[in-house]
């Protein structure tokens, strides 16, 4: 039992359960099966992007371009399916486009040694600008029926987008926890100087992490385009960068790198989804969502700071 309470994800899991319980008391609609399915579908896109963002944050970086990558890929895929491409081929091209965006970010950061935030801030404008140019600044609509499967279809009785999120979360959670590449990410984010002295391939690791971030944004873009059924490149997924950063921090990831898990970030995404949905079904003003999200980020950062302080005391032998 003590091991369970000492798990990194335990606070966010307990807090998510408490918040869900409170909303279930406030509204009988909250725990209805249809509403739970709505919450899960609503968090799918944010959850997939948050997987990549968590890996970037673990390295001590930040990817502000994920929303623009999502807008660009969804625009490309939307144009392709409307041009008569097979929807699976269009989806594959979209994922490759996401990977290319991630590689561009990674190469600029590693080869030119430009800070992550500055690089992804610049590419955020570039990618969205390309998306607006390709779309001509107009809405992309009237997708073929077959395309709706990615965002609205079911597989084995379960929503396909939720299956994609779960598979990706388990895959990258396994990679981070059990592979040499995952351990390298934690080591670099935890202590860059020590990782450099030990001869770790830091630039290669960073390049791969941004590649994965772009690829995951590509997956999310396909589901997004299919789910909403129309795309406006200038406004698509405009605030998702901040949502996924918030989810990762609330889920226990450290803004300084080296600390965090995919499971924690998934519960961060779930908690934000529960709050957004619970506020609406409980008939509170939706304006409270932003205030509550901001408060949760502050609490998460305080908890992280306290934990780092206690860890440092343990290392110095001042605390058992």
Image (cartoon, rainbow, N blue to C red):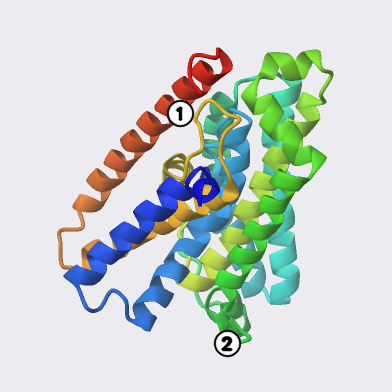
Q: CA distance from mark 1 to mark 2?
A: 42 Å
Is residue 280 visible in the rendered image? The answer is: yes
* Residue 279 horizontal side relative to residue 304, left or right: left
Element type at mark 1 = helix
Where residue 270 sits, quadrant-wise, is bottom left
What residue is pinned by disc 2?
157
Residue drawn where x is 50% and y is 46% of the image: 2
Q: How many marks?
A: 2
* Residue 10 horizontal side relative to residue 285, left or right: right
Which callout, 1 or 2, points at the residue further toward the start of the chain? 2
Residue drawn where x is 58% and y is 85% of the image: 145
Point out the frontmost of discs 1 and 2.
Answer: 1
- Above-or-below relation of 237 to 126: below
- Above-or-below relation of 237 to 118: below
Where residue 116 sits, quadrant-wise, is top right
Residue 96: where, in percent of width, then height? 74, 54
Where residue 283 sits, quadrant-wise, is bottom left
* Residue 64 horizontal side relative to residue 17, left or right: right
Q: Which mark is drawn over residue 307?
A: 1
Residue drawn where x is 55% and y is 77% of the image: 143
Residue furthest out toward the left: 284
Residue drawn where x is 48% and y is 19% of the image: 319
Element type at mark 2 = loop
Residue 302: where, in percent of width, then height? 36, 29
Residue 108: where, in percent of width, then height? 70, 27
Q: Nearer the viewer, residue 4 or 119?
A: 4
Q: Nearer the viewer, residue 189 or 108?
A: 189
- Above-or-below relation of 88 to 74: below
Q: Residues within 10 Å of mark 1 (few under 14, many from 20)?
A: few
Contact? badges 1 and 2 (CB < 8 Å) = no
Is residue 238 visible in the rendered image? The answer is: no
């Amino acid at each position: 039992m003590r091991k369970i309470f000492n798990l990194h994800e335990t606070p966010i899991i307990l807090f998510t359960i408490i918040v869900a319980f409170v909303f279930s008391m406030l509204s009988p609609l909250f725990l209805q099966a249809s509403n739970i399915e709505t919450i899960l579908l609503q968090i799918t896109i944010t959850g997939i992007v948050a997987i990549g963002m968590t890996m970037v944050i673990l390295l001590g970086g930040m990817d502000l371009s994920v929303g623009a990558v999502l807008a660009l890929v969804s625009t490309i895929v939307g144009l392709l399916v409307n041009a008569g491409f097979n929807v699976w081929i269009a989806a594959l091209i979209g994922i490759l486009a996401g990977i290319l965006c991630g590689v561009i970010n990674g190469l600029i950061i590693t080869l030119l040694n430009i800070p992550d935030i500055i690089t992804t801030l610049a590419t955020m404008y570039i990618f969205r600008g390309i998306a607006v140019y390709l779309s001509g600044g107009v809405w992309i609509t009237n997708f073929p029926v077959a395309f709706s499967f990615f965002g609205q279809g079911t597989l084995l009785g379960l929503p396909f987008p939720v299956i994609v999120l779960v598979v990706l979360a388990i895959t990258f959670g396994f990679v981070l926890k059990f592979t040499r590449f995952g351990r390298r990410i934690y080591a670099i984010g935890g202590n860059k100087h020590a990782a450099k002295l030990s001869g770790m391939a830091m630039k290669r690791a960073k390049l791969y992490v941004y590649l994965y971030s772009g690829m995951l944004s590509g997956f999310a873009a396909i589901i997004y385009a299919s789910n909403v059924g129309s795309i406006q490149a200038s406004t698509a997924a405009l605030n998702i960068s901040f949502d996924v950063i918030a989810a990762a921090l609330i889920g226990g990831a450290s803004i300084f790198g080296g600390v965090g898990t995919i499971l924690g970030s998934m519960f961060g995404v779930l908690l934000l989804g529960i709050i957004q949905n619970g506020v609406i079904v409980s008939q509170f003003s939706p304006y409270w969502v932003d205030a509550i999200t901001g408060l949760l980020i502050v609490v998460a950062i305080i908890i992280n700071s306290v934990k780092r302080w206690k860890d440092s005391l343990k290392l110095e032998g001042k605390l058992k």
